[in-house]
Amino acid sequence: MHKPGFFWLLATCCLVPLAPANAQTPQPEDIEVHAARPVTVQSYQAVARVFRRFNALPEQDRANLSLHVLGRLQPDDAPLKASGLHLQTKNGPIPLFNADNDELTVPLTKALWEENPPLMANLTSGAFIGFTFQIAVAPPQPDQFTDAEARHWLRQLNNCMEDVVGVIVAFMLPDAHRLIVSVAPHSRLEAFRNDQTQVLLDNQSDAPQEFVFRPQDYPRDTLFRSTKAFSKILVKIPLDPHASMKRKS
């Protein structure tokens, strides 16, 4: 008869440890498992509707403006990709995170809208995904913009608010009146007028720095410029809107 091979015996010994003859029968233990597992957190249509609504705003109100949703895995404040957020479609999973940042990336297609697949994420019992909303600006030139352009962007956001929540509600909310300029590393943000330059922020660090200001506080012929292209320009949204996703299953 063929004898068992060495590798078979080794595997058996590893999988079934030998026990002393007088060993007591181990008692069952209660073990709590807190490992993250894929759970449903939302439906596709509920999330896609936000982007579709913004894209349906009048062109004159959203020209040069774009909606961005940033997410972090809470309560550990981990990157969005740590949640494994994805669409579980009939053709397979579609990741909804950008590996390089915390931005939510939602494909907007008719097929996905009709299928309405669930959004899944790897969440422990107490975990959730927190989202913040941003309105980014694409200036005609990457390293400068005028005061008139800045005021126009603020008016656009006010008009978008009226389109979304209604004129009466928008009237009760504080106006969007601040810009958030992300100044690139080792560059300066300056206000230039009448051949005079005022340094608003001198970023000597290796990371972008934000400068928040009211364009209304400067003369209308002011030119805001940077020695390097801006990392990002945002219009501050009133009331700091945010949302969260928790397990639904």
Image (spheres, helix red, strand yellow):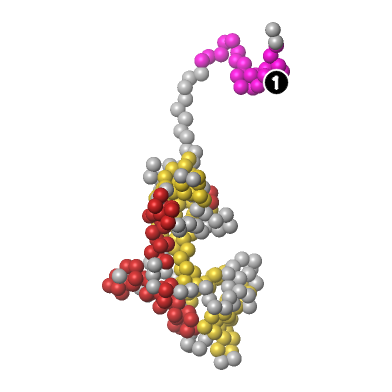
* Whether residue 123 is visible: no
Q: Is residue 166 above or below residue 116?
A: below
Q: Residue furthest left?
A: 168
Where is residue 46 shown, x and y percent of the image? 38, 55
Instruction: Please give the range of residues in magenta.
Output: 3-25
Q: Is residue 4 above or below residue 104?
A: above
Where is residue 75 shown, x and y percent of the image? 47, 50
Q: Quadrant of the C terminus?
A: top left
Residue at x 61%, y 71% (from the top left corner)? 184
Question: Which residue bears the numbered disc 1?
Answer: 7
* Whether residue 67 is visible: yes
228 left or right of 127 in image: right
Please tell me whether residue 19 belongs to the stretch shown in magenta.
yes
Q: Secondary structure at mark 1?
A: helix
Q: Quadrant of residue 225?
A: bottom right
Residue at x 44%, y 43% (from the top left corner)? 39
Residue at x 30%, y 70% (from the top left corner)? 166
Where is residue 134 shown, x and y percent of the image? 46, 65
So how many labels did they put on this image?
Answer: 1
